[in-house]
Image (tube, rainbow, N blue to C red):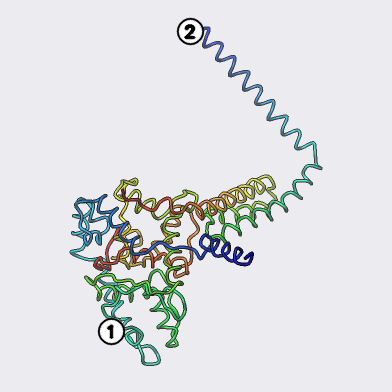
Amino acid sequence: MAKTTYSTFLALFAAAVLLTGCSDSGTDTMTDKPAAQHDEAVDLDTLITQAEDAQSEADKLGFEWSVTAPLLEEAHAAAKAGNHEQAIALFREVKHQSMLAIEQAHYADKHWQLLIPVND
Amino acid sequence: MKGLTCLSAILLGSLFVSAPSYADPQSDQDDIRAFFQKRFPKVELAGLADGVYAINENARSQWEEIEEFPPYEDAVDEGQAFFETPFANGKGYADCFPNGGIGIKQDYPKFDTETGQVITIESAINHCRTSNGEEALPYGQGQLAYVSAYMAETSRDNIINVVIPDDERALAAYEAGKKMFYERKGQLNMACATCHISSAGAQLRAEITSPALGHTTHFPAFRFAWDDIGTLQKRYAGCNTQVRAKPFALQSEQYRNLEYFHTYMANGLPLNGPGSRK
């Protein structure tokens, strides 16, 4: 029993050390590469266009989710405040939600009759 | 000969590629009634006009007590006062509607063959105002909902009689409303039918989901959640928001078509609005 507890402790400790190492390494990589930040700035503009286009398409289909527009506002606010990483994450989420809504619209168009009650 | 063969092929093809085929509204209505009669065998069709209070005894006894001192009474009185107050040009609501606007709600929504649009009683109220030089009122609640509540009260016990005229545009509007009722929307991926057909009568957290046939009977309704009288389309927007779908504008074509289908399904049920609901 004591041996098992000791082994578990060692395994958890090793995992914690590995995770910390990975995390530090990630931070270093980001701070060491200003060029990457420049790329992300370019990507942000593209991402904004993609997210807004997708949202507009979902709206046009009548399937926009009510939670998407507030996220878009939040994303623009983050971008304006210079919070680049947060803005990217939020615009990605807007794009993702909108793509799902578009997919939902296409699915509904083909399969909306599935919920019509069938009487035996 | 070759020409004839081609013509035959075109004619044969046209059998398969033709105008969109619509279901028969009467058969839709029969199917939905049969479904609810099977789901709630102890409830008569007319009883479904009471909505959730037709299928749950506890909720019904609370509702009956509330109805002894109806929370919508003041709104109906105010609605009557607004209804009877002449517009600046001397005319009034009574001049815009058949029978002076009294006891006519059972005929709405209507399909207007001139405009090719579905007219709800609320859109007709605002049309009456604007065509008499008055400003349109905001939809959903407030003065317009009160006038509508008064008109509903004068129509109590009248039997819903929504007509779909022999006009392809009317059938298309009905079909669009039907599609909207059954299509899943929002982040929660739910349709109107998910709660009010498939799960009607089920416990949804602290609530019992109401059957779809008893909705259009009692609006405008006083909802305790609103602490006021509100219209059916305000509820549609609320339902859309609850499943995290962006709601349409009140009295948009989408909601008018939905109301057309939804009310047609309740044809034959007595009106009992304005009602009170949680």
Residue toward you, B172 or B257 = B172
Chain where mark 1 sits: B
- The residue depicted at 27 percent of the width and 58 percent of the height is B51
- In this view, B208 is above or below B17: above
Counting every numbered tag in the picture gives 2
User: Are there few (<14), some (14-19), or many (20+) residues within 10 Å of tag 1?
Assistant: few
Secondary structure under badge 2? loop
Q: Is residue A19 left or right of residue B48?
A: right
At label 2, which amino acid type do we have? Met
Q: Quadrant of the C terminus of chain B?
A: bottom left
Give coordinates of residue B83: x percent, y percent: 32, 82
Give coordinates of residue B165: x percent, y percent: 38, 74
- The residue depicted at 70 percent of the width and 29 percent of the height is A24
Chain where mark 2 sits: A
Residue toward you, B54 or B221 = B54
Q: CA distance from mark 2 to mark 1?
A: 89 Å
Mark carried by residue A1: 2
The part of the image, by quadrant, that contains residue B11 is: bottom right
Labels 2 and 1 share a subunit: no
- In this view, B122 is above or below B92: above
- In this view, B116 is above or below A3: below
Give coordinates of residue B24: x percent, y percent: 38, 63
Secondary structure under badge 1? helix
Give coordinates of residue B187: x percent, y percent: 50, 49
Residue toward you, A73 or B243 = B243
At label 1, which amino acid type do we have? Asn
- Residue under pointer 1: B99
Mark carried by residue B261: none
